[in-house]
Amino acid sequence: MSVRSVGGKNVPAVGTWAIDPTHTSISAVARHLMVSKVRGSFGTFSGTIVVAEDPKDSSVEVVIDAASIDTKVEDRDNHLRSPDFLDVENHPQLTFKSTSIEADGDDWT
């Protein structure tokens, strides 16, 4: 991926970019009984980043295989896949679509 400068900020070159799962991770953290944190990750996902000429017109879309949740505890993972939480039988995918991209200091978020 090449970069260009827009308003003194480095941004990726215009185009549609595939998210590379080998160099990307998707993780989540949740509080457990307000005492500890449970960390997990999703192992199967895909997505695209569309970089527009004006970075504010760019977008991100990610589709995650909900059943690929991994907290390193099999019983907990199975419970997370159940109708109590992710309900992967009825909702096999989690989808994220950005609604805006804006400058944040020297970066774009």
Image (cartoon, rainbow, N blue to C red):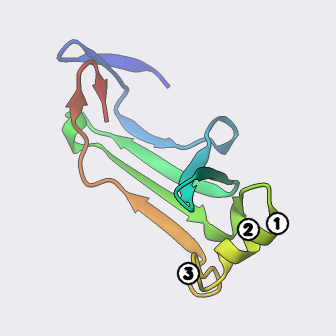
Residue extending furthest toward the right: 74
* Marks 3 and 2 close (CB-CB < 8 Å): no
Percent x, y of residue 101: 25, 41
Mark 1 vs mark 2, CA separation in Å = 5 Å
Residue assigned mark 3: 91
User: Residue at position x 74%, y 68% from top?
Assistant: 76
* Marks 1 and 2 close (CB-CB < 8 Å): yes
Please identify, in this view, whether the residue under mark 1 or under mark 3 is nearer the observer.
1
Mark 1 vs mark 3, CA separation in Å = 20 Å
Which image quarter is the C terminus in?
top left
Percent x, y of residue 57: 22, 43
Left or right, residue 65 beside residue 17: right
**Which SS class for mark 1?**
helix
**Which SS class for mark 3?**
loop
Disc ID at residue 74:
1
- Which amino acid does the dot numbered 2 rest on? Asp
Disc ID at residue 77:
2
**Which SS class for mark 2?**
helix
Left or right, residue 22 beside residue 12: right
